[in-house]
Image (cartoon, coloured by chain):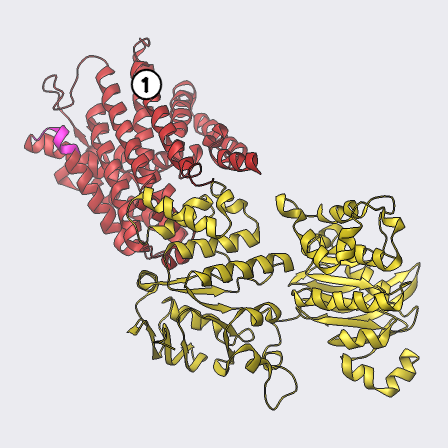
């Protein structure tokens, strides 16, 4: 009697996720329309971008448990690749962003090759150091204008080049599409063999091997998908802002900002990055806008204190507010 | 016997110069259950790791179904059809039970839908189907062990390695584990199991291999293993001093209003032993048991299962599996037999808490006949059975009995001591204080003689019982 009933627990959950995702997509599509304030619209665009970036980080750091503190590297590769291809070679960013994604994925594989043999904190430290190194290198690389950065000249309104003159509304939909695709990728891999393997590797690599899980290739797969998503996000960011420099696209603070929404929202969960970004990015931007001018870094202190408070109140991530973890337990309790 | 499923040919392995396995050869027949026994450090784990591909033997070779597998690595070994569980449970705690097993199923299928169907089938075999959607970390320890078996089964092994699957379980849980092993075997899967609890293992296995200091000491049927020529003790008893005693008391002191009752008692009890404490009235026997149970203040050290319980509150000691059946039984007289038993079970949580009832009824059928009777109306012997039964409901690992024969007619004393032996047979360690020396020493493995708060003599129960000097001097016999 259990057989026809039980198998649907996961399937039902996944269907529900798709439904919630579709509703959310529709709502987010309508969200900017009543908002006239350009600043608020920009805030939403940034939030969407970080939701997608963090979704990408979550594939490697959340599902596979390989905590990366160097994701700005992939972001920067994506941003620089698409920008250079556009400004020097005239290749439109709609193509360039895929080049950026591929390059970022390759970088992630290259970095993973030696680093996935490290375990625990060492992987995080290695990514941190390599990220810092990359920033230094680009700061001194004349071909990409070194520390001065690259300004993307505005040609004409064009979807192909992702250049729009009026407001930020078009970018709202660009970023929404990006986040939605990142979410769908996460949703797909979560239910696939890879998703299971990653979580098994995260929880216990030895046990995973005894179940014929190849640990190293699993990590490499997660790293490449994660790097690609982040790289595309970097390319979109470059087009949105119109200017990139090493500090804003390769800095350590960006690496933290990419990881933080997933960590605060719920590591290794589908909704964690979205919820985390929705809470953190407005918080960070608003506290900077209201208090940043006061000097002394009061905004950062308040922002930091809020993150600590969130972590203390919800160690499982904000996503646990929605009962994501306790749901399965509740069902079992019902039939006991 | 057709071709053996597994052949070990002179397998040797050493770690930084220390030999873990030396020249080990044996065959495993298809469909059999083979026990791998030996004390800690005998090389069981490294042998398991060699067979499952986790380590590479230095010399010798391992053939699975006629093909060499040594050096292939764990993933390839699993793909070829060798599954394993781990001594220390390694469940994927961020995943649900079903998802845990699906990881195993993905070894054979690509699509999540197929993996799920397969995982559910295996969960049903392992009796975990109702737990499918629970997070794995919410399972009880015995359920987690089942989960490991389920996960390994999902990889469709033809050979399954079970590493101490029954260790640390209460008797009821161990019996369920045994049933699971039998069920797996009935599916045509060959099993090699490492186990310490010989009472459970030997009836279960077809053959056993005894390892000692990295070498193969003996191989044969359980009967051959137990009947070790040239030694009076069973071979596993000499080869296997279990890895440290389950209970170890060091320099225990206790006092009543300044009056010293215990003067530095040293005592140990190994897993599965019956240890008797004998001595005249007022020697401090009850004080000793109450001190171990945390029911009175003591000085000195008490270590149970590697954990110091010396200054732990009594209820926590009880939860660890140390249970005292007190002198005079202390039943809830106005409550029914059934309610007395149920009260014992409330120390545990979860829906399975009443499961030991079946065990209690099989030990003491009389109690089942008197379920609704008030406890105070039972005879002395029945009350004692009820007191032991109530203690068993907590699923103890160490059962301490204080004068179980007190106020009981002789015929029932034999019944109760027989029940004590059966309880030990389930893997429970017994510490018993008794006035009836002859009968008690007859069932005990070892004994301590206590006199005015000091241990004056200890040794094998048979020696203590036969020593005329001791009998006269200390036991007044």
Extreme-front residue of the structure? B369
Write the residue at 66% across / 87% down: B232
Image quadrant assignment for residue B286? bottom right
Extreme-bottom residue of the structure? B230
| Whether residue A252 can be seen here | no
The residue carrying mark 1 is A28
Relative to B475, is A105 above or below? Answer: above
Image quadrant assignment for residue A140? top left
Which chain's colour is yellow?
A: B
Q: Position of residue B299 (x, y in %)?
A: 80, 63
Which quadrant does the N terminus of chain B fall into?
bottom left
How many numbered marks appear? 1
- Mark 1 residue crowding within 10 angstroms, few (<14) / some (14–19) / many (20+): some
Q: Position of residue A254 (x, y in %)?
A: 32, 35
Q: Is residue B209 left or right of residue B77?
A: right
Q: Position of residue B315 (x, y in %)?
A: 74, 50
Predominant secondary structure, magenta span = helix
Write the residue at 46% across / 49% down: B123
Image quadrant assignment for residue A34? top left
Q: Nearer the viewer, residue B3 or B85?
A: B3
Chain letter behind tag 1: A
Which chain's colour is red?
A: A
| Whether residue B66 can be seen here | yes
Q: Is residue B78 left or right of residue B265?
A: left
Which secondary structure lies at badge 1? Answer: helix
Q: Is residue A72 left or right of residue A293?
A: left
Relative to B120, is A28 above or below? Answer: above
Q: Which residues are magenta?
A: A91-97
Relative to B209, is A33 above or below? Answer: above
Is residue A93 magenta-colored?
yes
Write the residue at 85% across / 49% down: B375
Q: Nearer the viewer, residue A1 or B330?
A: A1
């Amino acid at each position: 009697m259990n057989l026809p009933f039980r198998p649907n627990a996961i399937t039902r959950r996944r269907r529900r996720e798709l439904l919630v995702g579709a509703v959310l997509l529709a709502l987010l599509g309508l969200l900017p329309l009543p908002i006239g304030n350009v600043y608020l619209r920009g805030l939403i665009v940034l939030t969407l971008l970080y939701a997608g970036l963090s979704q990408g980080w979550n594939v490697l750091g959340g599902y596979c448990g390989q905590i990366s503190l160097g994701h700005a590297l992939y972001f920067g590769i994506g941003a620089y690749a698409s920008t250079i291809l556009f400004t020097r070679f005239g290749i439109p960013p709609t193509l360039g962003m895929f080049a950026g994604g591929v390059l970022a994925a390759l970088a992630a594989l290259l970095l993973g090759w030696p680093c996935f043999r490290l375990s625990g904190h060492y992987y995080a430290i290695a990514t941190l150091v390599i990220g810092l190194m990359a920033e230094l290198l680009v700061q001194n690389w004349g071909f990409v204008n070194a520390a001065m950065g690259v300004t993307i000249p505005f040609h004409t309104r064009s979807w192909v080049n992702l250049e729009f003159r009026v407001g930020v509304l078009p970018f709202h939909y660009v970023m929404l599409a990006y986040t939605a695709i990142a979410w769908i990728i996460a949703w797909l891999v979560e239910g696939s063999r890879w998703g299971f393997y990653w979580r098994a590797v995260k929880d216990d690599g030895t046990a995973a091997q005894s179940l014929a899980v190849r640990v190293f290739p699993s990590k490499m797969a997660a790293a490449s998908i994660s790097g690609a998503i982040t790289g595309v996000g970097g390319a979109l960011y470059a087009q949105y802002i119109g200017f990139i420099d090493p500090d804003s696209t390769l800095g350590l603070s960006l690496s933290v900002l990419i990881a933080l929404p997933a960590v605060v929202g719920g590591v290794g969960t589908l909704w964690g990055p979205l919820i985390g970004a929705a809470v953190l990015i407005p918080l960070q931007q608003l506290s900077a806008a209201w208090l940043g001018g006061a000097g002394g870094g009061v905004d950062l202190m308040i922002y930091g204190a809020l993150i600590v408070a969130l972590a203390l109140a919800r160690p499982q991530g904000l996503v646990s507010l929605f009962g994501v973890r306790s749901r399965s337990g509740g069902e079992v309790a019902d039939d006991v | 016997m057709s071709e053996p499923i597994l052949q070990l040919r002179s397998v040797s392995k050493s770690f930084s110069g220390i030999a873990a396995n030396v020249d080990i050869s044996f065959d495993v027949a298809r469909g059999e259950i083979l026990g791998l026994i030996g004390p800690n450090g005998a090389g069981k784990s490294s042998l398991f790791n060699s067979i499952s591909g986790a380590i590479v033997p230095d010399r010798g070779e391992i053939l699975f179904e006629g093909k060499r597998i040594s050096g292939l690595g764990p993933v390839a070994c699993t793909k070829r059809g060798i599954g394993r569980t781990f001594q220390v449970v390694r469940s994927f705690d961020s995943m649900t039970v079903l998802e845990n097993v699906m990881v195993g199923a993905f070894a054979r299928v690509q699509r999540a839908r197929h993996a799920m169907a397969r995982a559910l089938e295996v969960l049903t075999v392992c009796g975990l189907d109702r737990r499918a959607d629970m997070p794995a970390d919410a399972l009880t320890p015995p359920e987690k062990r089942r989960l490991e078996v389920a996960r390994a089964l999902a990889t469709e092994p033809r050979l399954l390695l079970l590493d101490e699957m029954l260790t640390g379980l209460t008797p009821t849980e161990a019996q369920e584990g045994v049933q699971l092993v039998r069920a797996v075997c009935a599916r045509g899967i060959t099993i090699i199991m490492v186990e310490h609890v010989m009472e459970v293992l030997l009836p279960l296995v077809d053959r056993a291999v005894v390892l000692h200091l990295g070498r193969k000491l003996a191989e044969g049927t359980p009967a051959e293993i137990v009947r070790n020529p040239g030694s009076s003790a069973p071979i596993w008893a000499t080869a296997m001093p279990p890895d440290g005693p389950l209970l170890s008391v060091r320099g225990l002191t206790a006092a009543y209003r300044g009056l010293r009752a215990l003067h530095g008692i040293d005592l140990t009890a190994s897993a599965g032993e019956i240890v008797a404490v004998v001595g005249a009235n007022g020697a401090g026997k009850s004080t000793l048991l109450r001190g171990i149970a945390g029911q009175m203040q003591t000085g000195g050290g008490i270590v149970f299962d590697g954990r110091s319980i010396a200054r732990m509150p009594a209820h926590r000691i009880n939860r660890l599996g140390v249970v005292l059946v007190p002198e005079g039984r202390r039943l809830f007289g106005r409550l029914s037999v059934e309610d007395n038993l149920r009260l014992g079970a409330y120390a545990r949580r979860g829906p399975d808490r009443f499961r030991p009832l079946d065990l209690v009824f099989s030990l003491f059928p009389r109690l089942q006949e008197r379920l609704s009777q008030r406890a105070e109306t039972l005879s002395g012997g029945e009350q004692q059975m009820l007191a032991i039964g109530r203690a068993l409901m907590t699923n103890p690992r160490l059962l301490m009995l204080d004068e179980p024969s007190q106020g009981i007619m002789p015929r029932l004393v034999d019944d109760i001591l027989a029940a004590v032996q059966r309880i030990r047979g389930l893997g429970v360690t017994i510490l018993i204080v008794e006035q009836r020396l002859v009968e008690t020493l007859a069932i005990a493995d070892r004994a301590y003689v206590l006199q005015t708060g000091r241990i004056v003599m200890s040794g094998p129960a048979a020696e203590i019982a036969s020593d005329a000097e001791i009998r006269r001097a200390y036991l007044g016999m």
